[in-house]
Image: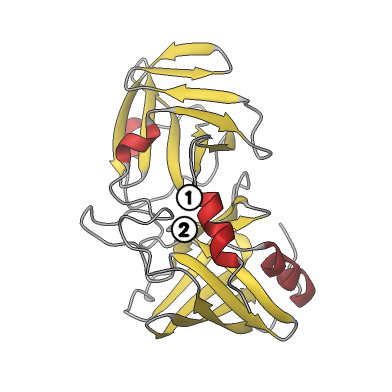
């Protein structure tokens, strides 16, 4: 597991961090729901100066790519405060650092990192973007058709290129016949010969994560909206080559002062 100190936290914040919103131990939201309050581009006000915070619905980004999943902690689903467990992509268990978001105004919040065994580290944050609701570039709402396209590999993937249609998955030229179903908003379940093969999960922005299942995952587990699968054979971050959310994010971050 990763060890977090205040110095490493500040380094992470300086790179630009994205956090995700999920229901308790789950990413799912009702189909009619808007994206969470904290979805957007923010300025963190640290003692060492402003730092960028970029928020999709579900993931923490570092170095411009999705990095950490967040899972809502039970009992913190009120209107203003949200506590999260975190998990780093390709880890099989929770990372020992929690995140709290506390809304203090329409475009302001307190952002707290709580490494296990250390004092929590809290900063204020101001929104740089317009409120990011269901049609924003960082939201995962109502974007099911975006999965069916060609995706490019990233520094966080072994694959170079993949293409998904409703009946075929092609990875670096290797094609296989599949069936695809939406198992929750922003997540597709991919099956081959009736057996779960992978999730393709919307990471917000221009990105998605291809999550390869380990052998033995059942259809019921794949479809379960209450219990998350944490242990995958691999999780690969891919990018929509035609996306322009990275450009929009960069433009917003230039407004920091």
For this rendering, which residue is in front, 205 or 246?
246
* Residue 75 x/y as whole percent: 37, 75
Residue found at x 50% / y 72%: 128
Image quarter in which the N terminus is found: bottom right
Q: Residue 31: tell me if it is visible.
A: yes
| Residue 241 relative to residue 195: left or right | right
User: Where on the picture, by quarter, is residue 232?
Assistant: top right
Residue found at x 52% / y 24%: 162
* Residue 214 x/y as whole percent: 53, 31
Q: Are marks 2 and 1 in contact (CB under 8 Å)?
A: yes
Residue tagged 2? 56
Residue found at x 56% / y 61%: 251
Q: Residue furthest right?
A: 7
Q: What crowding class fits label 2: few (fewer than 14 Cα within 10 Å), some (14-19), or many (20 or more)? A: many
**Label annotation for residue 47:** none
Q: Secondary structure at mark 2?
A: loop
Q: Say whether disc 2 or disc 1 marks the residue closer to the N-terminus.
A: 2
Question: Looking at the picture, does residue 245 appear above or below residue 102?
Answer: above
Residue tagged 1? 205
| Residue 116 relative to residue 203: left or right | right
Question: Looking at the picture, does residue 27 appear above or below residue 224?
Answer: below
For this rendering, which residue is in front, 186 or 87?
186
Q: Residue furthest left?
A: 32
Which dot, 2 or 1, sits closer to the camera? 1
Image quarter in which the C terminus is found: bottom right
Question: Looking at the picture, does residue 151 appear above or below residue 142?
Answer: above
Q: What's the distance in space between the residues labelled 2 and 1, CA to CA?
A: 7 Å
Q: Secondary structure at mark 1?
A: loop
Residue found at x 33% / y 19%: 194
* Residue 256 x/y as whole percent: 61, 74
* Residue 249 x/y as whole percent: 54, 58
Q: Residue 220: tell me if it is visible.
A: no
């Amino acid at each position: 597991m990763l060890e977090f100190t205040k110095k490493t936290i500040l380094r992470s914040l300086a790179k630009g961090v994205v956090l995700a919103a999920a229901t308790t131990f789950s990413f799912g939201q009702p189909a009619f729901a808007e994206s969470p309050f904290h979805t957007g581009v923010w300025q963190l006000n640290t003692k060492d100066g402003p730092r960028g915070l970029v928020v999709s619905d579900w993931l923490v980004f570092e170095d411009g790519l999705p990095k950490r999943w967040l899972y809502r902690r039970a009992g913190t689903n009120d209107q203003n405060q949200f506590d999260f467990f975190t998990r780093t992509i390709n880890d099989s268990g929770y990372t020992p650092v929690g995140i709290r978001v506390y809304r203090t105004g329409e475009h302001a919040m307190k952002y707290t990192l709580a490494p296990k065994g250390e004092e929590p580290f809290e900063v204020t944050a101001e929104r740089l973007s317009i409120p990011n609701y269901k049609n924003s570039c960082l939201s995962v709402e109502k974007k099911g058709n975006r999965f069916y396209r060609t995706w490019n590999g990233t520094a966080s993937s072994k694959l170079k290129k993949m293409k998904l249609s409703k009946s075929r998955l092609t990875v670096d030229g290797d094609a296989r016949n599949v069936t695809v179903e939406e198992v929750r908003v922003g997540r597709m379940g991919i099956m081959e010969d009736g057996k779960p093969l992978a999730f393709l999960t919307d990471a917000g922005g221009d990105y998605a994560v291809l999550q390869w299942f380990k052998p033995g995952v059942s259809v019921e587990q794949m479809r379960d909206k209450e219990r998350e699968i944490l242990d995958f054979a691999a999780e690969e971050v891919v990018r929509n080559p035609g996306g322009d959310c990275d450009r929009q994010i960069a433009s917003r971050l230039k407004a920091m002062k």
